[in-house]
Image: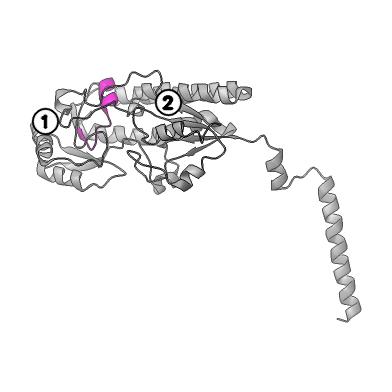
Amino acid sequence: MNKLGAGIIVGVAIAVAIIAAIVLSNSNVSSPANLQSSETPKFKVAASFFPLYEFAKNVGGDKAQVYSFLPIGSEPHEWEPSIQEIEGLKGTKLFIYNGAGMEAYISKFMESGEFANMTFVKATDGITLLKADSAEDDKEILTQGGMDPHVWNDPIYAEQEVINIKNAMKKADPANAQYYEDNADAYITKLSALDNSIKTGLSHCKKDTFVSFHNAFNYFTNRYGVHDVWITGIAPEADVPPQDIQKVIQIAKDKDVKVIFSEDLVDPRLANTLASEVGAKVLVLSPLEGINETEQQEGKTYLDKWHENLKNLRVALECQ
C-alpha cells in the first residue's frame, strides 16, 4: 500500500471515532461512570462482625453499602483492628456494634474524637443481658465476670437487634424510612420462622445436655430449655486449667454425651481430645461469630448457619 492510501485509511478512522464520540455524547446511553454518578449514592454502614453484618445487610438492602469491619475468617473476641482497617472507616455513616464487651476497641473509637461524623449504634439496646457467670449449675465450670454478649444466638433477641438497626437507618436516611421498615419486617418474619424451627426441632429429644466449645449459648439455652456444658469461657481461645477439663469430662460421662462440639473458627484439637476421652464424636456448633472464605463465596447466611447448628444439635440431643 502506498503512503497516500495509508493516509486515507488513517483519516477515515479518525473521522469515524470523532463521529462516534459525538453520537454517544448526545444519546441516552450512559457509560458506567455516568451511571455511577447519576445514581443516588448509598450511605456506608459498618457492622462489627458477622451476625450484625447479616442483620444490617438485610435491613439496608440496596439503599445502604453494608460491610463487615471484622475480616473474613477472623474470630471477634479480643480482636483489634489494624491502622489500615481503621482508615477504611472513612466515610462511614453508621457503625453498628453489639456491645456487652464484645468489641474491645469500641470505647477507644468513641472517645477518640476521630469519628465525629459517624453514628455508633449499639445493637443490644433494650435487651436484658445475662451476667457471664449466671448459668445453670452444670455450666458453671469456669468463672467469668461481666456480661454475656452472645444475644444473637437467641433468634428473638436477634429480632430486637434488627429493630435497633432499622431505627438507626431510618434516622440516618429518613427519605427511605419505609423501605427499611419493610425490609426489617421481612427479615424478622424469617427469624420468627427460625425460632419455630428450633422449638419444633428440639421438642422430642432423648437428651437435654450438650457440650459446646465456648460459653456462647446461654441466651439460646434459656430460650429453648436445654443445657450447655462449655469447655472454655466467654472467649473461645482462653486457656483452660486441667481441672476444669476434667470437670467437663466427668459431666459429659455422667450425662452420657455422645457429641462434643467444636467451632468453625478455632483449633479443633481440644474438642477432639475431649471427645476421645469421653468416647464421643466431634461435630461443629457455630457461635455465628464469623465465617470463613469458603462460606463467604457460597453466600452462607446467618439463617443457613443456624439451620446447620439445629441439625447437629438434633444429633447431639438424639431428637426424633
| Residue found 45% across the figure and 31% down from its top | 110
Label 2 Cα neighbours within 10 Å, binned few <14 / some 14-19 / many ≥20? many
Say whether residue 253 is magenta: no
Question: Does residue 207 show up?
Answer: no
Residue 266: x and y in percent read 28, 45
- The image quadrant that residue 135 belongs to is top left
Identify the mark nearer the N-term, 2 or 1: 2
Secondary structure type for disc 2 = loop
In the rendered image, the vertical position of residue 13 relative to residue 150, given as above or below: below
Point out the image quarter for the N terminus. bottom right
Q: Which mark is residue 181?
A: none
- The image quadrant that residue 278 belongs to is top left
Residue 268: x and y in percent read 23, 46
In the rendered image, the vertical position of residue 137 relative to residue 62, given as above or below: above
Q: CA distance from mark 2 to mark 1?
A: 36 Å
Labels 2, 1: front one: 2
Q: Which mark is residue 255?
A: 1
Question: In the rendered structure, are the residues bearing label 2 and label 1 in contact, judged by CB atoms less than 8 Å apart?
Answer: no
Q: Hey, what amino acid is under mark 2?
A: Ala
Q: Hey, what amino acid is under mark 1?
A: Lys
Q: Is residue 314 left or right of residue 166?
A: left
Q: Is residue 189 left or right of residue 79?
A: right
Q: How many numbered discs sit on the rendered protein?
A: 2
- Report the residue marked by disc 2: 123
Please report the bounds of the magenta region as a residue range.
Answer: 211-224
